[in-house]
Amino acid sequence: MSDLMEHLPLTSLVPAGRHGRIDGPAGVSAKLLDGTEVATLVARRAGGPQEILGLPLSAGPKASLGGGLAAIGTGPGRWLVVADATGPTPLADRLEEAAAGKAAVTEQSDAYLVFELSGPRVRDALAKGLMVDLDPVAFAPGDAATTSLAFVGITLWQTDAAPIYRVAVGRSFAASFLRAFTSGAAEYGFFLEGTGRG
């Protein structure tokens, strides 16, 4: 594992494939979700929108999920909105129309990469660099956190009890995030998909 990291340029994403322990099934999997759209939504005043595109907007660190969309509360009157796939009308345009002047919308698709993390040992791998309690009693589907993993700022939300998590990370920090996460997941066997050859 350390040999791979030693020869990988600091600005390159970890290459797709199996990393760390190679016997048995991978305990942790990650997939770069290609084609996601991301936008920020910021309420203009206290009477901001209560829902957007059919999703309720939480007042706290929660993720509203549905219809291929996630609206994640990242702060008071602030949400990160993620669409699984590019639609005929850009996400930011749909949000702008739905907000009807009650919120500011900023297109962020080029600023973020979104990863889906899963596997029976994903909580253990995340716990190595994350200062959030991911025990199912404390963090369940629909819960979210804007935090850091190994000093890299991320927005994390749980989409399924399996557990399955999604992570939005700034594009310029994605290589650092993946290096840290790969190192933490390696002992469980880690399979990475969607990053190409690094």
Image (cartoon, rainbow, N blue to C red):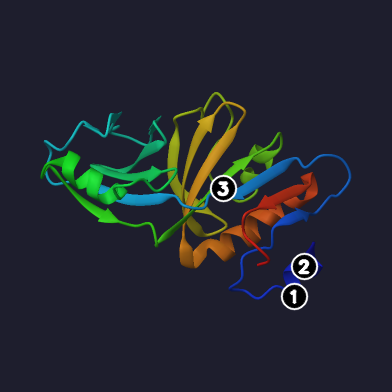
Q: Position of residue 70 (x, y in %)?
A: 39, 37
The residue singled out by tag 2 in the image is 4
Three-letter amino acid code at disc 1?
Answer: His
x then y, percent, for residue 108: 34, 57
Residue marked by disc 1: 7
Seen in the picture, residue 68 relative to 151 is either above or below; the reply is above
Q: Residue at x 58, y 64 (%)?
A: 176
Disc 2 residue crowd, few under 14, some 14–19, many 20+, Cα 10 Å? few
Determine whether 115 is above or below 60 in the image: below
Which disc, if any, is residue 130? 3
Position of the C terminus, as image quadrant, is bottom right
Seen as rendered, the residue at the extreme right is 23
At label 3, which amino acid type do we have? Leu
**Which amino acid type is shown beneath numbered disc 2?**
Leu
Quarter that holds the N terminus: bottom right
Identify the mark at residue 72; answer none if there is no mark.
none
Q: Are marks 2 and 1 in contact (CB under 8 Å)?
A: yes
